Amino acid sequence: MKLDLSDLPKLQFSLIAAVLLIAVGAGTVHFFLDANRAALQARSAAQSERNEFDGKLKRVRTEENEIRDKSAVFSMLQMRGFIGDEQRLEWIELLKDIRDKRRLIDLEYDVAPQRPLDPTPVSAYSFFVSSMKIQLKLLHEEDLTRLLDDLRLQARALVQVRYCNVSRLPRGTPEPGSPALLQAECQIEWITLRDATGK
């Protein structure tokens, strides 16, 4: 079948309908492509927002765990007596108990006034230190190490040994009946943590 110009008026409505359908189809495809692009952008933005919220949630959980851990350490230190006012009377009683338990021969001590460990505190809590000079006579060196170990384990403060000098007693100097062969002189520090504002 051959078409010529005389058939054109008969096909006019069909051609117009075909052009309109093509235009509607192209418009529909364009609309759905735009809608798909917008949906992908919205999905990407939602994913980014979700990732951001996930990151914030992880940070909050990490901070919560850190606070919980620090709180546990703080409570443990407080329970051990490291936090708060110094307990000088308890320290002296502890020294006497260790002396009696370990049967130390002669134990003398002198405690200096408490002072801040760092004169410029960086937070509400600051470390304070009290220096103590200890002099004692020993049967052997192990008496000294036991004394220091007992102090570290039992004291309601952090005990830090600054120095210890151990020397042999000169022959003939021990008091009659004293088995001491050595003498020791140590400087230790009792360190506590407390509110720097004095509250």
Image (spheres, grey):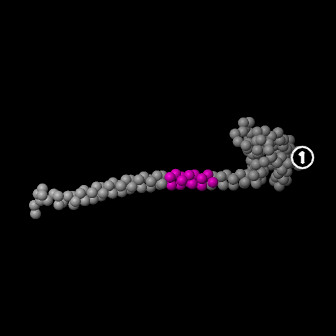
Looking at the picture, tell me which residue is in the foreground, 25 or 89. 25
- Answer whether residue 159 is visible to the viewer in this image: no
Q: Residue at x 74, y 47 (%)?
A: 158
Residue 73 location, x and y as percent?
Answer: 69, 53
Q: With 142 as the anchor, is 12 left or right in this view?
A: left
Q: Which quadrant holds the C terminus?
A: top right
Which class describes the residues within 10 Å of circle 1: few (<14), some (14-19), or many (20+)?
few
Q: Which residues are magenta?
A: 49-64
Residue at 75% over, 45% down: 193
Q: Dot 1: what SS?
A: loop
- Relative depth, front residue between 100 and 118: 118
Dominant secondary-structure state across the stretch colored magenta: helix
Q: Is residue 124 left or right of residue 54?
A: right
Q: Residue furthest bottom?
A: 1
Q: Position of residue 149 (x, y in %)?
A: 74, 51
Instruction: Evaluate whether residue 5 shows in this view.
Output: yes
Q: Badge 1 is on which residue?
A: 176
**18 displayed left or right of 173:** left
**Magenta stretch holds residue 51:** yes
Outermost residue toward the top in this view: 119
> Residue 123: image x %, image y %?
70, 42
Q: Is residue 174 magenta?
A: no
Q: Quadrant of the N terminus?
A: bottom left
